[in-house]
Image (cartoon, rainbow, N blue to C red):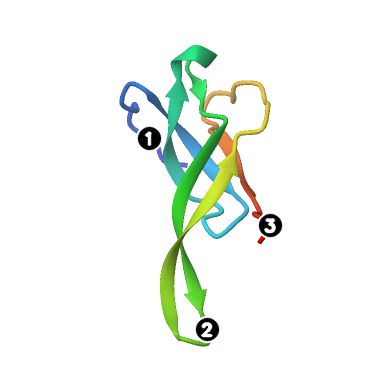
Amino acid sequence: MPKLPDPEPGYTWARLEDGPLGGEIILAPTEAHRRNLPASMIGVLAPVLDEVAETIEWSPVTYLCPPQYPPKQDELWRYVSVRDAG
């Protein structure tokens, strides 16, 4: 993995797992009241293909940061997708 620049204050680097954006690296917000740990839940917009209409729409996807120890050096925090019912 290439070396990432230092994130802006209030953010940390994280990798999205699963879902339509699996494998993407993002800047995730941190929460001061949680000792600057990554936010426990984030929402991101992801492209969704409608094969019938042959269009792409942007749809919100929820990702959770599971309880984990801080990542080792050269590793990222991780988020897993949540499949919304409905």
**Amino acid at dot 3:** Ala
**Amino acid at dot 2:** Glu
Image coordinates of residue 50 in percent, x first then y, are: 50, 78
What residue is pinned by disc 3? 85
Looking at the image, is 63 positioned above or below residue 32? below
Q: Nearer the viewer's eye, disc 2 or disc 3?
A: 3
* Furthest residue in direction front, as rendered: 86
Report the residue at 46% width, 44% height from top. 25
Nearer the observer, 72 or 28: 28
Residue 10 quadrant:
top left
Q: Disc 3 on helix, strand or loop?
A: loop
What residue is pinned by disc 2? 51
Q: Of the two numbered discs 2 and 3 on the same chain, state the one appearing first in sequence.
A: 2
Image coordinates of residue 74 in percent, x first then y, are: 51, 29
Q: Indicate which disc residue 4 carries.
A: 1
Q: Nearer the viewer's eye, disc 1 or disc 2?
A: 2
Q: Where the C terminus falls, by quadrant?
A: bottom right
Q: Position of 78 compared to 59: left or right? A: right
Nearer the observer, 63 or 9: 63
Q: CA distance from mark 2 to mark 3?
A: 21 Å
Q: Nearer the viewer's eye, disc 1 or disc 3?
A: 3
**Amino acid at dot 1:** Leu
Q: Of the two numbered discs 1 and 3 on the same chain, state the one appearing first in sequence.
A: 1
Nearer the observer, 19 or 15: 19
Q: Disc 1 on helix, strand or loop?
A: loop
Q: Position of 51 compared to 6: left or right? A: right
Q: CA distance from mark 1 to mark 2?
A: 36 Å
Looking at the image, is 71 positioned above or below residue 16? above
Q: CA distance from mark 1 to mark 3?
A: 35 Å
